[in-house]
Image (tube, grey):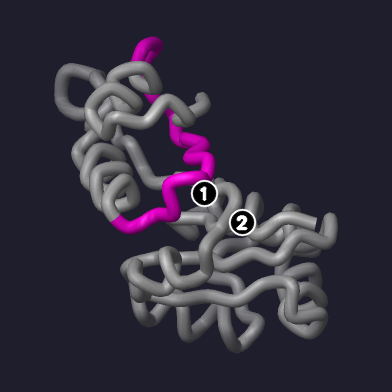
Amino acid sequence: MKSVAVVGLGYVGLTTAIGLAQLGHIVLGFDIDASRIRLLSEGKSPIFEQGLETALRTVLDSQNLAFTDQIQKVAEFKPEFIFVCVGTPQDESGAANLTVLISVTSQLSVIAPPDSIIVVKSTVPVGTGRKLAESIERKDVFM
C-alpha cells in the first residue's frame, strides 16, 4: 500500500482521506484548522455524510489514518502521493479564487519529497494544473 497525504480536510479532502485509508493506504490528513484536527482525531466528523463517522473511527482504529495541523509533518511523513483538496471559492465575477491552492502547492514544492506526486483534487479552471506545475517547477501535478 501507499503512503498518502491529504491537504485540506473539508468535504472532498476528508472523504478522500477516509476512502484511501479504507483501501489500506496509510494516510496523513492535514488542515490548518487545529479544532478540526482535534475533532477528527477523536473520531468525530465536522460534516455529515451517512456512515462517514463510523468509517472515520474504523480507519483511526486501524491506524491507517492520522491527522495533523502542522505542514512540516507532511514532509516528515514522506508521502508517495499528496492530494491537495483545498477550497477554490468563486469570487464576485464567478472566477475560482486560487489563492489558497497556489499558496499550498508552493509550500509543498519546497517541503515535499522530490519523488512525491502532487495530485490537485480541487475544482479549478482548465489549464490550472499546467500553470501550477510550471510555477513550482514540477511535472507531476495531476488534475
Q: Residue at x 47, y 85 (%)?
A: 38
Left or right: 20 as drawn, with respect to 72:
right
Q: Hey, what amino acid is under mark 2?
A: Val
The residue at 27%/34% (across/down) is 136
- Name above or below for residue 100 compared with residue 70: above
Name the residue tied to disc 2. 4
On screen, residue 52 above or below 45? above
Tell me the quarter of the picture where residue 79 sits: bottom right
Q: Residues within 10 Å of mark 2 (few under 14, many from 20)?
A: many
Point out residue 98 in the picture as x, y percentages from the top left corner: 25, 33
| Relative height, residue 119 to residue 49 (above, below) | above
Q: Main secondary structure of the magenta part?
A: loop
Judged left or right of residue 89, residue 85 is right
* Residue 65 image point, x, y percent: 67, 72
Quarter location, residue 58: bottom right
Whether residue 83 sits left or right of residue 109 in the image: it is right
Extent of the magenta region: 111-127
Mark 1 and mark 2 in contact? Answer it, CB < 8 Å.
Answer: yes
Q: Secondary structure at mark 1?
A: strand
> Which image quadrant: the N terminus?
bottom right
Quadrant in the picture for residue 18: bottom right
- Label 2 sits on a secondary structure element that is strand
Q: Would residue 61 be counted in the magenta stretch?
A: no
Q: Residue at x 30, y 40 (%)?
A: 101
Relative image position of residue 94 (x, y in whole percent):
24, 19
- Label whose residue precedes the other's in the sequence (1 or 2): 2
Q: CA distance from mark 1 to mark 2?
A: 6 Å
Name the foreground residue: 84 vs 141.
Answer: 141
Q: Is residue 112 above or below residue 74?
A: above
Closest to the observer: 18 or 48? Answer: 18
- Please give the residue where the numbered disc 1 appears in the rendered image: 82
Q: Amino acid at mark 1?
A: Ile
